[in-house]
Image (cartoon, helix red, strand yellow):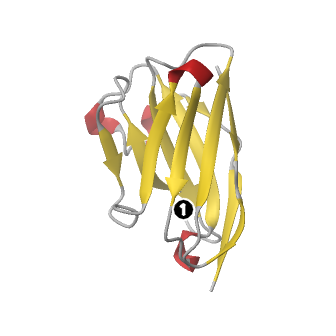
Amino acid sequence: VQLQASGGGSVQAGGSLRLSCAASGRTISNYGMGWFRQAPGKEREFVAALTRSGSITNYADSVKGRFTISRDNAKNTVYLQMNSLNPEDTAVYFCAGDEGIIYSRTKNQLAYKYWGQGTLVTVSS
């Protein structure tokens, strides 16, 4: 499966963006999906995840209440709605997926087999 992340851009603090992760080659309706980000000079970190069923989500504490992960199986796409953005959210955002992931490992990058190329989000103050 190939993952294509898009939707990044430049926004001012307090603004919103919606990232998309479009899959091709295979349906991801039974995949656990996640979003990670890497800020300049920092390691890549977990942002949000959605279990295979789509009924359970997991968020990093830093984005809880501001970001929402969702999926549209008909479009074979996963989204990350980001609200109330602040400069600390500036990073390259990556989507990832795996058909075998379980909830307890959704924060673990090594649990994901497939990765998108990343999309840059820049938040100015």
Residue located 62% across and 13% down the image:
26
Q: Residue at x 68, y 71 (%)?
A: 11
Q: Is residue 112 visible?
A: no
On the rendered structure, is 28 left or right of 92? left
Q: Is residue 29 above or below residue 49?
A: above
Image-quadrant location for residue 8:
bottom right
Residue depicted at x 35% and y 30%: 51
Crowd rating for badge 1 (residues with CA inside 10 Å; few <14, some 14–19, many 20+): few
Of 55 and 92, nearer the camera is 55
Query: x and y percent of residue 38 in the render?
Result: 59, 60
User: Residue reaching furthest bottom?
Assistant: 125
Q: Is residue 14 left or right of residue 120?
A: left
Q: Quadrant of residue 125?
A: bottom right
Give amino acid for label 1.
Glu
Give residue 69's position: percent from left, percent from top.
45, 44
- Compared to 8, does 79 lie above or below? above
Residue at which label 1 appears: 43
When the figure is inspected, residue 32 is found, relative to residue 19, above or below; the finding is above
